[in-house]
Structure formats: structure tokens, C-alpha cells
Image (tube, rainbow, N blue to C red):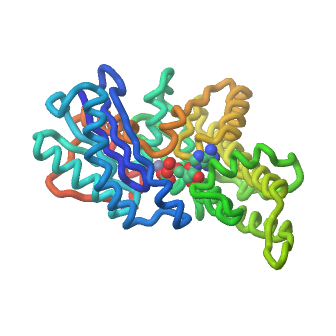
Amino acid sequence: MRVLGIESSCDETGIALYDSEQGLLAHSLYSQVDMHANYGGVVPELASRDHIRKAIPLIKQVFSDAQCDEQTLDGIAYTSGPGLAGALLVGACLARSLAWTWQLPALGVHHMEGHLLAPLLEDPAPEFPFVALLVSGGHTQLVDVKGIGQYTVLGESIDDAAGEAFDKTAKMMNLPYPGGPHIAKLAQQGTEGRFKFPRPMTDRPGLDFSFSGLKTFARNTIIKCQQDRDGHKYVEQQDQADIARAFEQAVVDTLVIKCRRALEQTGHKRLVIAGGVSANHYLRERLHDLMNKKRGQVYYPRPEFCTDNGAMIAYAGCQRLMAGQKDGDEIRVFPRWPMDTLEAV
Ligand code: KG4
Ligand code: ZN
């Protein structure tokens, strides 16, 4: 089965062609990051308008890259939630219009299921069951994955997502949006052990996360380091790097502690990490160490499939379309959509 995938839930337009026999045929991505950077975060209306501009040219590009056309397609998958309502509607309306014109089945895919299954595009792909740590700008979740659509959420953030905490802390240090990669880069120059940030919610049982306190801790540390030059407050580059390092260590430590608990609780030997923050090198390194100690294996997508992309949606949609699932007549999007309500395949 050959599926066209369309991702438009936030600030990236991602398009891909996935074939169940031949694998990923082509993918392309347009990131709106530069446009939103001027505003320090995603502006929903601008995001929707830009998806309209970019989606069709990118679809033409993937057909050209894969040297095929719509006549070879068996279905269309698109992100129908969770995400920004307007941005989701652009992808949904386009996917459903194309499916209607080309007389193909269409299916709305859960964005986080896309992230969760993205490591299955790699070789070797993880086998089920596994624990998945989903860490993006909007979500931080630990999931017990027994198969496609068989998800039990073991824990999640009760306030900010890990990526959101990275972005907000970066903003306080006047770093560009999205801040995660900038904090990670700065942290490399940071002094080990100069600041010690808390590891929230690790002193009690359970698998939920809370990252908003870390952000406040970062703000207070920044204020303590502020110096005055001609009436302007500033923080020395080295102080910034030391704060970035302490912050990154606290987030990563917290994630590692909870992953270890989730593995002990489920007895699984495989750990999958996905979502934008899974691109973080220090997190990967620490999870490798954890899984080496546990004689297990950690899996993650290639860097460009950690953040939002069309390939993960084409892949997830293909698995479900092959199982005979498809949309009904109405076009719907789900800005909020709990993952454990999904149908099993
Ligand atoms: O999955 P994603 O592309 O979008 C959402 O679905 O939210 O994740 C974006 C998030 C942003 O918060 C960004 O700062 C973070 O992933 N991120 C990182 C790194 N690369 C991206 N955070 C920490 N370290 C990184 N290297
Ligand atoms: Zn995402």
C-alpha cells in the first residue's frame, strides 16, 4: 500500500510518501520557525496561512522526487490532532479534498502516535512491546506500547512539557525560538556542578512530570547572575552557559529517572524516545547508559524525524489504512485528543 502523508499540526508543513513494500519513498518539510521567531513563539493564524501556501508545492515535490504520481496512491493520511485547530484544518481539508478527487480512502492520524511510531521507520526497528518516552514542545508522556493503538499512558506532565520548559527558559535568556537546541548548544560550554537545579517529582513514587518549577528556578538563577552596565541588566555568557547546563541536566536527569521506573514497572527491555526533545544528545547519551546497564536497547528516529515531519504520519496512517480503517463522511479535527482512546490495529 502506498500512502501520502500530510503533517500540519503546528509550525511545520511535512509531506511524505510511504510504501508498505518499498519503505519511505520521499519526504519534504517546510519549517515556519524563522517566521515565528520574530514573535518569540508560534502565531496560530500565521501558521495556518503558511500551511496553505506550502502544502501543495511540497506534495508536487515528493511526487517528483519519488518519480511517481497520484495514480500509484492507495490512501492519504493527515494529522487530525492534537494541535492548533486552524493548522489542523488546513491539512484535513486538503487531504480530504485530494482523497475525494482521486477517489482514495483518507484517515486522520494522531500526531503523538506519529511521533511514537517514527522509530519504526529506522533499521533496526523496535519490536513490541516497549516503553515510549514522548518529549515534544506540547507533550511529555511515558507510554506502555503493546502494539499499534495499544497504548497505556503511564505518566505525563501535569504542567509544562519538557520542550516548552526548554523554550521558555531559552526565552528568558534571550535565545532564539525554539530554544531547545540553543540551550543544548550553550550547555556544552557550561561548568559542571556550578548550579544545582531540582529534579521535580522524583522524590515520590509515580511517573508524572512537572517542569514549570524548573523554569521558575531558572528565572531566579538568571536574576541572581544579572549585572548592571550603564543601567542595562545583562548576564555574562559563561553564567548563561552554566545555567543552561544545570537546566539541561535537571530535565534530562528527571526524564531518565522516570524512564527507569517505567521500565521496572512494565518489565520491558526496549525504550523508544521520540518528539523534538529526543534530538537532544545529552538525553540520548544518558538513556544509552541506562539501557546498557539494564541490558536493553534504546531506539530513536533519525534527527529530522524527531521533530515534526510528514514521514511519521504517512507511516502511522499506512498501518491503519492497511487494517481497513478510514474516515467517515465528515471532516473533523481534534485539537485535544487523549492517546489512549485510539483504536487498536
Ligand atoms: O515534536 P516537535 O517538533 O513539535 C511538537 O510537536 O511540539 O518538538 C519541538 C520541541 C521544541 O520545544 C524544541 O525546543 C525541542 O523540541 N527541541 C529540543 C532539541 N531540539 C528540539 N529540546 C532540547 N534539545 C534539543 N536538541
Ligand atoms: Zn510534534
* Left or right of residue 194: residue 234: left
Q: Position of residue 7 (x, y in %)?
A: 36, 47
* Left or right of residue 259: residue 98: left
For the residue pair 32 and 167, the one nearer the viewer reads as 32
Q: How many marks?
A: 0
Q: Position of residue 285 (x, y in %)?
A: 70, 34
Above or below residue 177? Residue 229 is: below
Is residue 343 visible to the viewer in this orientation of the structure? yes
For the residue pair 153 and 284, the one nearer the viewer reads as 284
Above or below residue 40? Residue 304 is: above
Where the C terminus falls, by quadrant?
Answer: top left
* Left or right of residue 3: residue 212: right
Q: Looking at the image, which residue sits at the far bottom?
A: 231
Residue 272's quadrant in the figure?
Answer: top right
For the residue pair 32 and 106, the one nearer the viewer reads as 32
Q: Position of residue 186 (x, y in %)?
A: 74, 49
